[in-house]
Amino acid sequence: MEQHHFGQTHDVTNQAPPLADYNLLSSDIALSAALERDGAGWHREALLRHGAALTTPDTLALAELANRHTPELFTHNPRGERIDALEFHPSWHTLLSLLRREGLHALPFSDPQRGAMVARCAGYFLHAQLESGSLCPLTMTFASIPVLQREPALFDTLRDQLYSREHDPRDVPLARKTSAMIGMGMTEKQGGSDVRSNQTRAHALGGGGRGADYRLVGHKWFFSAPQCDAHLVLARTGDHAGLSCFYVPRFAPDGSKNAVQIQRLKDKLGNRSNASSEVEFLDAFGIMIGDEGRGVPTIIEMANYTRLDCVIGSAALMRAALVQAIHHARHRSAFGRQLADQPLMRNVLADLALESEAATVLFMRLARAFEASADASSGSPAERAWRRIVTPAAKYWVCKRTLEFTGEAMEVWGGNGYVETGPMARFYREAPVNSIWEGSGNVMCLDVLRAMEREPDAAQALFAAWQADAQAHPALRAALGNLAATLNGPAEQREASARRIAQQIVLIAQATLLVEYAPAAVADAFIATRLAEGCGESGRVYGTLPATFDHAATVERAFRA
């Protein structure tokens, strides 16, 4: 009789090994090329080091741990005193230490030089392939710096901690810390994206005005990363109809906890490693930054940077899901062949690869535009257009496409992709957040129209450049013509078509970049399946590339471990 060891019913075969110990930068041809052409080649060695460190088994485990052991809120200590303390798993702090070590919270400001913004965005893209929640406080800290720099007296007290490459998790007054994190609080229950309906009030402690001390009374419905050392928030003063912007520290000047009470932490679909909260201001101390009544224009500069990071974060989720799908298909066999050798699977993978590369070249081009202009009103008209018009369009389209993309990549894994023991389910749960955060799809598309109306010279410069790039591509020329016709229609029809307009702007932008920087076959396939007649108008599923296209070569280009 055949003998069996107890508990052994079968051998484990035909399972893909865990993907680890590869380099996130050197395996990404599109990112590597963009790094060089956009002036950030000097940062390559640092990014190569970072790209290798992020894929070790120990580092990969941090992402799973931080999302399984979510933050906890402790409102009171054993004596009944209000403390509003947050407790994170050690993996969370290790992730933040990795981010700060690379300078991803401040690099273009702390070490200004050509390519610094591009280098920072590339590094952010690498980390976002590991874990998304830890990026939230880092993004807000990064985006707060150009706003705070316009308040020299306040910024002088914060510069060293903002630029520090150490992560200091202690919940103590900022003067005693080696580093600082800054958050943001705009949304209230009654308004959501309509921040002009905010009701929080600010009462001057003295004469009032810019740089003066205030007490804030009100609430915020979404208060991101409440453990941050300070937040920028919007509130109304008694002297002005408009909203003003305030710097609200976690600790008051006397060293006591500021009167910002955390009501509860949000129980979120994804982004679970990061704490999001509801808070109330009970005479909380704050300092007005910017001019009174000009809070929205003051804080919108912060939002412009956070929107760019939303694009990068979503592009990174695409890249991470794509690499996992390709790796799985190269190691899994079905019906007598590896999945990667099955013609239809190759079509799916190649189509995903096109989408991912297009997102990568787009965010790197946006990074260059942000570097070329100190703010949204400076720089050449074309660079302003990339920053002011294409950024919200990209935030709409790339973030929106990531939902379908991660679902398709999960399907490549089959049932293994649907369980929480692998990374695909986490990627899928993370996918919606960037579409919602910092302005949902409709808000972004309406902002695109508003930007084009306010800066017609920038829009014209952008379209002129695109027309020159499109001369050799009839489908691209036709798409530009159709977009121009839509934009020249009645105002009400333009608003009703805002999503279609934003979508076409991004697809045309991606097509022109691929024409310039990718192999001709890649650019041609993208144009044929996204912009040719009947395409790109109402959506499409992945895996519908022409059968004559070299799917295998595109998959190989996408990921070379």
Image (cartoon, helix red, strand yellow):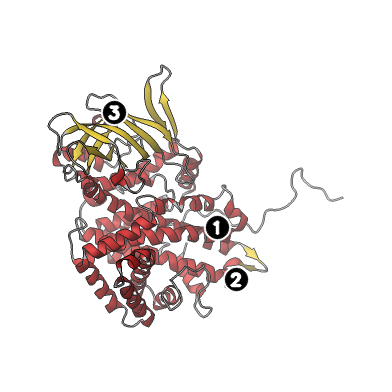
Residue drawn at x 16%, y 39% as measured from the top left: 156
**Secondary structure of residue under mark 2:** loop
Judge whether 158 appears above or below 142 on screen. above
The answer to whether mark 3 and mark 1 are in CB contact below 8 A is: no
Q: Earlier in the sequence, mark 2 or mark 3?
A: 3
Q: Position of residue 444 (x, y in %)?
A: 34, 57
Q: In this figure, which residue is indicated by the disc labeled 3?
A: 258
Q: Which mark is residue 342?
A: 2
Marks 2 and 3, how far apart at CA: 61 Å
The label nearer to you, 2 versus 3, is 3
Q: Earlier in the sequence, mark 3 or mark 1?
A: 3
The label nearer to you, 2 versus 1, is 1
Marks 3 and 1, how far apart at CA: 44 Å
Density class for disc 3 (Cα within 10 Å; few <14, some 14-19, many ≥20) is many
Q: Position of residue 524 (x, y in %)?
A: 41, 78
Residue drawn at x 43%, y 48% as measured from the top left: 131
Judge whether 266 appears above or below 479 on screen. above
Q: Which mark is residue 410?
A: 1
Asked whether 285 or 410 is in front, the reply is 285
Asked whether 561 or 406 is in front, the reply is 406
**Secondary structure of residue under mark 1:** helix
Quarter holding residue 171:
top left
Q: Position of residue 482 (x, y in %)?
A: 35, 76
Q: Image check: 63 left or right of 11?
A: left
Q: Position of residue 267 (x, y in %)?
A: 47, 39
Judge whether 299 appears above or below 285 on screen. below
